[in-house]
Image (spheres, rainbow, N blue to C red):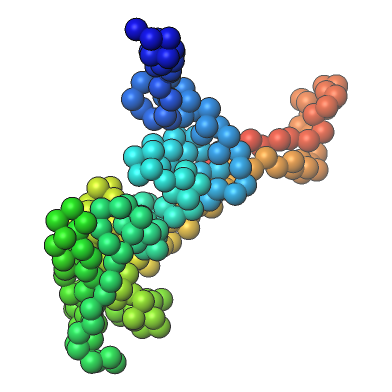
Amino acid sequence: MSEKTAIQVQEQQNQVPDIVPGFGSKSALELAIKAANVLAKSTLVPKEYRGNIANCIIALNMSNRMNADPLMVMQNLYIVHGKPGWSSQFLISTFNTSGKFSALRYEWVGDEGKDSWGCRAWAVEKATGEKLTGATVTIDLAKKEGWYGKDGSKWQTMPQQMLMYRAASWFIRAYAPELAMGMHTADEIYDTIDLTKDDYEIMVEQEIKENANKETIDVEPPVEDKPKEKRQEKPRQGKQQTVFEEGPGF
């Protein structure tokens, strides 16, 4: 064995594989917890991750599986009515940079301004050279599914963009579901979940309770006549104010 070959063998033996934050091993989990602690203290991450180490660990795991930057994942993963969903731009960007397909393109059908107007996404699979075409999304479909008429719906103000976003998300879940990781886009979740007036009132009431329980308030005690049996008791020092760590039970 030559001296050069011996050195190469020794270097290979000394190489230690990089530990990736995740759930694969004890070392990986410990590294994920350390990284999550740093992210949870940052003011640049969305509020769902601030002070929430568990959410940060999940975001780190997802970013490793997607080979994406953790902060980018956090900034593009939205919680809509308790369900996580990607931003449409992020999902399209992930697809275009995956290296498995050409960039997404769109074919338009129908007449603009009419219910028949719509589009479908397509791309070429690089391994086979085959052109793949997704399902067609139209304004008529959006109206029948109830997306178009929802309060605050973007389908009425930016229909062209919404048609492209929906056609892209359907295409990606059909031909590259591993990129979406089984999740819908935030727009899709918003379009498919209905909340009644009672649901909104319950959510507001719960938020009030949670915020009340998190605050520490100094309250001056009311001035009242002390009961006769307590008038002879000596006042204790340092008890002029009462601190409530928990809010009242509503």
Question: How far across and how far down the image is residue 43, in percent?
Answer: 62, 47
Question: How far across and how far down the image is residue 121, in percent?
Answer: 23, 70
- Residue 216 or 177: which is nearer the viewer? 177
Q: Quadrant of the N terminus?
A: top left
Query: Could you say which quadrant of the image residue 241 lies in?
Result: top right
The reply, left or right, for residue 37 in relation to residue 117 is right
- Residue 222 or 35: which is nearer the viewer? 35
**As drawn, 184 above or below 16:** below
Residue displayed at 31% across by 64% down: 103
Q: How many numbered discs sit on the rendered protein?
A: 0
> In this orientation, does residue 91 appear?
no
- Residue 132 or 21: which is nearer the viewer? 132
The reply, left or right, for residue 228 in relation to residue 127 is right
- Residue 43 or 108: which is nearer the viewer? 108
> In this orientation, does residue 64 appear?
yes
**As drawn, 40 above or below 113:** above
Residue displayed at 29% across by 66% down: 104
Residue displayed at 51% across by 34% down: 36
Residue displayed at 39% across by 38% down: 64
Hey, which residue is sitting farthest top in the picture? 1
Query: Could you say which quadrant of the image residue 139 lies in?
Result: bottom left
Question: How far across and how far down the image is residue 223, in percent?
Answer: 80, 43
Question: How far across and how far down the image is residue 112, in percent?
Answer: 28, 91
The reply, left or right, for residue 155 in relation to residue 11 is left
**As drawn, 32 above or below 70:** above
